[in-house]
Image (spheres, rainbow, N blue to C red):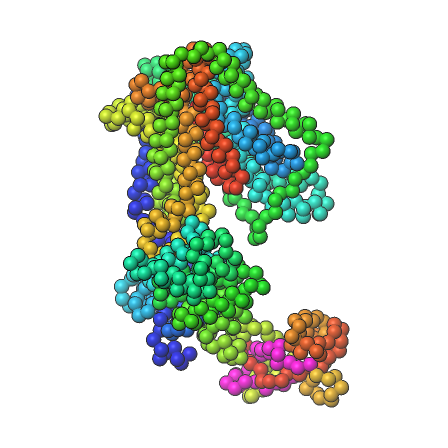
Amino acid sequence: MTRARPPLALVAPAAAAAVIAVIPIWYLIDRSLERGVDEVIDELWQRRTLDLVLRSVGLTATVTLLCVVIGVAAAWLVVRSGLPGRRALRVAFTLPLAVPSYLSAFAWISWRPGLAGFTGATLVLTLVSYPYVMLPVVSALSRLDPAHDDVARSLGQSRLQVALRLTLPQIRTSIAAGALLVALYVLSDFGAVAAMRYEVFTWVIYGAYRAGFNPSRAAILATVLVMLALALVLAESAVRGRAEARVGSGSPRAGNQVPLGRATPLAYLFVAAVLGPALVFPMWRIGVWVSTYVSTDISVHDVGGALGQTLMLAALAAVATVLLAFPTGVLAARSRSRLARTLERTTYVGHALPGIVVAISLVYVGVRLLRPIYLEVPLLVLGYVVLFLPLAVGAVRNSVEQSPPRMEEVARSLGDGPMRVLRRVTAPLALPGIGAGAALVLLATMKELPVTLVLRPTGTETLATRLWRYTSVSDYANAGPYALALVLFAAVPTALLSSFSGSDRTHSVRARQSVEAT
Amino acid sequence: MSDQRTTPAVLAVHDVRKAFGQQQVLRGVDLHVPAGAIVAVLGPSGCGKTTLLRLIAGFEQLDHGSITVAGRLAANCGAAGPTMSLPPERRRVGVVPQEGALFPHLDVAGNVGFGLRRGHGPDGRVAEVLALVGLAGFEKKRPSQLSGGQQQRVALARALAPKPSLVLLDEPFSSLDAAMRGQVREEVFEVLRAANATAILVTHDQQEALSVADQVAVLLAGRIAQVGEPTELYASPSSLEVATFVGEAVVLRGTAKGARVECALGSLPQRANGPVSGPVDVVVRPEQFAIVDTDADNHELLTGTVVARSYFGHDGIVRVSLPSGTVITCRTPAGTLPARGDKVSARVMSPVVAFAATE
């Protein structure tokens, strides 16, 4: 569009979104400094704090590395290998996203309690988060120009050389983006580490918050956690630099498939080694739980009620988040002004905020400023909005960017003012992206645990909270039906997600998961 | 040029300047487009022609100068009068962008009727304009079901539907393949003339500009270098830059001596009003050369060896290397096209254009 000032009708709601996004930061600063700077230094200058940092960083690094290996291999298999059934495999490899990390964790320790600790946390977090690397790499690989490979081969390069010298550099930024998502996810995951009893930041923060005697300790630790997350975001944007565009025009041919030949059984072995523990195992455990569960009318009613609550909250969160994200997304895509950039970046703060931090900051705000909606549905939805705004802003921005600004210019020249253009051209064109954003928020909200646990209205039970309640006391028989319902309903938006990743990458890249924060 | 002064201009661009950051793109552009005229703005890529178009449409804000559309001030900055800029929707300027930019979520009727306000009989107008562009009955088609040429015609119909004062076409044929381009171009300009529309065509394709426009404005390095009818532009370029940009030419250093110039091709007659003395650049068009019989005994003949040739069917081009090292480009009828390596003689058949050398 033009360099003119962006319209106020967009800036005002975008500014509101930015303000909402920074609520937790305001809380953190305010609360951390409540007892003075000395207290902060005291709290940080302790052996246990250092241990906490080391454990969190160690877990994050290990899981991220494993996810990169598995995610890139899986992406290559479903895009470039000649493996039969690749399309179905792509969906299957994505489905572990529908398994909440705490559910997977309980599936494992209910079977082998000895897994608790670093090993179990690493196993579970790797299995649920490798798709965050796979999805962006799948779309990057699909976008590569196969003519490059042909040219390189004709210049005497072997397949391996092509992969290392040509393919890898071109998908590097997608790998980095995916690795960032995994790292943020691991840092902010609450359910899996709690189930595995591995003391990292989120669990300790939750404990400090629950214990209640020292809220500023929770805030100080949360600040350290947010700093770690911010460092990751900055590191990733340094790696990313500028994304390369495809040079030259013409529609690309379908990618060359590399026949696997005698390596085919090996490929299937890889598939089994990933999908077995990531998908089949938790489903088998859920099956076991359900089969030992003795049905009574009241419990069926309870499952239905929790499912209803879950869907209602997820729908509210999706609508609220997308509505609030739309102005910011449009501004980010269409305006080059500094104001627009700042507003967009501010909403991405949620990107680096673990759910548990958002939850306790909204408790603080709720008690002080929003008493009437404290522990009511609106405040809970506000929590989801803060967490998931980046998902929806990214999706809207991406879909608006895909339609050329010429469209809007032509509409202006045909006599429409900026707001009419927004309604008649921009919004309809962005509809697929808005839908994708809504699906992401829907999925994320269904699986979300810490914000729901802390902010839900008294007496409200969702599938996630019920599941949490039963599994944390090892009552797996009662958890079974809830687990089944959650996984089945989460699988729908997940399958949609895997089909988006083929055509464009940003939906998945921006699909920040910290948020699906268990 | 003279009729521009007398006919009221639909578009008057006065001393327009525009920079993006440090990059000065337009350095004072003046342009007058009389009613009903089709003016081509011709320039190499990066000369600022698309920027000029976007300023006229109101998609960009000018740094200096003024733009008047149909007698109404559309934008003004730094000149007499208030600094202002009408938004694009109030300029009544239709735009046909490069790839058509049809709205993919609307059918053909929805696209063409987009700029029509309800109550102005949009249905009748949509059918009317669609008939004008030869797409009657296409109302319910989706943009994705149309060929590139059809999309371009729908984009034109959409721009014409609200009866704009001026239509801007931004390289509208460059995305079409060569085979279709000529045909679609002819159709589009037939429609524009039938609608008696005033139009500006921005293009880097000199053939396109020369073949369809009433007037061609050559935009070089952010300034209008020359405006004129196509024939005038080609035959009497106002500068060496225009001469070499519009059409092919051999340029040689020489010295003016009254009505003649001395150069590597000998002493040649020059056009009227050229420099009478001093160093000059001599411009010779390929069709000013004629390949003649080597046997003819004439000291004015240039004899050399054919180093390259291109055959176009109706005629051909040969490059001849002269003993002096100068290479000349000659257009010859297809029947007499010499082969590579042939010894040929050529002579200059008409007065050449010379410009006082700048250095």
Q: Looking at the image, can residue B145 be seen?
A: yes
- Residue A45: x percent and y percent? 41, 19
Q: Position of residue B246 (x, y in %)?
A: 54, 72
- Residue A13 x, y percent position in the rendering: 31, 41
- In this rendering, the answer to whether A118 lies above or below B127 is above
Q: Quadrant of the C terminus of chain B?
A: bottom right
Task: Decide: is A508 above or below A126.
Answer: below
Asked if residue B223 shows in the view, the reply is no
Identify the residue at image location x=61%, y=81%: B288
* Residue A181, position as x, y percentages in the image: 49, 31
Residue extending farthest to the left is: A372
Magenta stretch contains residue B288: yes
Quadrant location of the N terminus of chain B in the rendered image: bottom left
Front-lying residue, B351 or B192: B192
Q: Residue at x 54, y 32 (%)?
A: A91
Q: Is residue A293 left or right of residue B264?
A: left
Q: Is residue B340 above or below residue A29?
A: below
**B272 within the magenta span:** yes
Q: Observer-nearest residue: B249 or A404?
A: A404
**Which residue is located at x 45 percent, y 19 percent?**
A483
Stretch of the chain drawn in magenta: B265-291
Q: Nearer the viewer, residue A420 or B283?
A: A420
Q: Residue furthest front?
A: B137
At 29% across and 58% down in the image, what residue appears? B119
Query: Height in image: A82 above or below A188?
Result: below
